[in-house]
Amino acid sequence: MILLIDNYDSFVYNVYQLVGSIDPNIKVIRNDALSIEDIEALSPSHIIISPGPGYPRDAGVSIDLIKRLSGKIPILGICLGHQAIVEAFGGEIIHALELVHGKKRPVHILMDEERAESLCPLFHGLPEIIEVARYHSLAANTQKMPDELVVTALAPDQTIMAVHHKTAPVFGIQFHPESILTTVGETIMRNFLSQRA
């Protein structure tokens, strides 16, 4: 079962529909409805932490869940979920250089030149430049990135658009794969759901 943590966000059921079109075995719970122990007892195959309002500290169990379950269960953070991953490993979230709400923008996928593929499994099979939907006013501070995380995608202004943990299947994306404006969203989600801890 795939567990989708709802950070009280209006986009959560768009994420649910995208994931459900790939694997219908999905459950949505609010970020304050269950403890970490309750979540572990559900034995999810994957965890997705949804977008939402506010800062990561406002996202219920999200940060503690990332700290406790990294390496045990594949985790994908979207927007606020991405920011929670950055904070969970010691990074800092700040106001973005540009406020972007409901805009389609290019993102540069960072490549492993030797293998001629993305540094991140989420982006395998995609071109170096993708168009994505962005809805955010906060972003990861590029000057205070945790050592455990690798930046895997950037906006043209160098705003961090994606990260990947160096040794665990933990991924964060600042943009919205569930939006119709992100035409590669299904590929990204399929790539995530193929990950194993």
Image: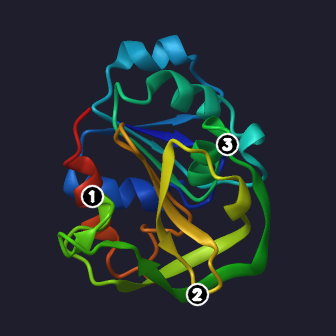
In primary-sequence order, the first of circles 1 and 2 is 1
SS class, disc 1: helix
- Residue 116 x %, y %: 20, 76
SS class, disc 2: loop
- Label 1 crowding class (10 Å Cα cut-off): few <14, some 14-19, many 20+? some
Q: Amino acid at mark 1?
A: Pro
Q: Amino acid at mark 2?
A: Pro
Numbered circle sitting on residue 121? 1
In the depicted structure, whether residue 101 falls above or below residue 5:
below
Q: Relative to 68, is 121 on the left or the right? A: left
In the depicted structure, whether residue 180 falls above or below residue 9:
below
Q: Amino acid at mark 3?
A: Glu
Residue at point 56%, 64% (across, down) = 174
Of residues 120 and 41, the one nearer the viewer is 120
Name the residue carrying label 3: 87
Q: Is residue 14 visible?
A: yes
Of residues 4 and 134, the one nearer the viewer is 134
